Image: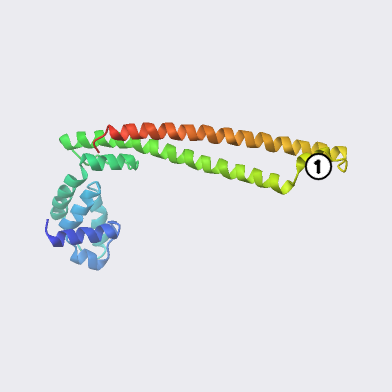
Amino acid sequence: MNLRLIATALLISLTGGCATMSADECLTADWYAIGFEDGTRGVTPDQIGERRQTCAEHGVTPDLQAWLDGRSQGLTEFCKASRGFQQGRLNIAYQGVCSGGAEIEFLAAYDAGLVVGELERTIQSLQQERYRAEAELDEADEWYERAGDIDAAVVSGEATEQERRDLLRKLRAYERERGELEYAIRQLDNDIARLRIELDHLRASMPY
């Protein structure tokens, strides 16, 4: 691939590769390079329709054949097993743009990526849940510290019977909440550790 094509494709990639184009972009477009970049992103053929509509507003007709040739070349980069794995891992919908043996390998890797990505997202979700449980535990402990020596207040003759009952209720609620949160955190740690082992074994069995 020549340097001009690489530079044009890189520029399109950095600007998002969207179908919206200015008048100058339509007039000076390298349609092969645009098609190549579109192909490497796995876009469907109707992408050129969006570009044609945009450029028609500026009185420019895209070079359809050059775009198709570029897209076809770009698809050879997209329709690789390694790319399929990453697409699946990120849960990006596959648009059915590959064909033949390349598609078979792409889809096998895509399905593997889906499994890995789901495991990774589950682990991340459990980690976030653990962070929330830890934050709640910290809040409960902060309340207990601010409350002072509740045990002493309960047995103190200075508190009324109603005050002692209220303090006991709050103390038991705190102890119950703390116990539940500590148990939840232990369970989450176990689940996270188990899933990480499963993920490591799964990744070690894959060539991607």
Residue occupying image coordinates x 19% and y 61%: 8
Q: Quadrant of the N terminus?
A: bottom left
Residue occupying image coordinates x 87% and y 43%: 158
Residue nearest the viewer, comparing 92 with 203 = 203
Residue 156 visible (yes or no)? yes
Does residue 136 lie above or below 190 as drawn?
below
Q: Residues within 10 Å of mark 1 (few under 14, many from 20)?
A: some
Under mark 1, the amino acid is Ala
Left or right for 139, reference 49 = right
Residue occupying image coordinates x 34% and y 35%: 200
Query: Outermost residue, left direction?
Result: 2
The total number of labels drawn is 1
Location of residue 206 (image quadrant):
top left
Q: Quadrant of the C terminus?
A: top left
Residue nearest the viewer, comparing 90 with 16 = 90
Residue occupying image coordinates x 23% and y 57%: 52
Residue that carries the numbered disc 1 in the rendered image: 153
Q: Position of residue 38 (x, y in %)?
A: 23, 52
Q: Position of residue 121 (x, y in %)?
A: 41, 39
Left or right for 144, reference 10 = right
Element carrying mark 1: helix
Residue nearest the viewer, comparing 103 with 97 = 103
Residue 61 visible (yes or no)? no
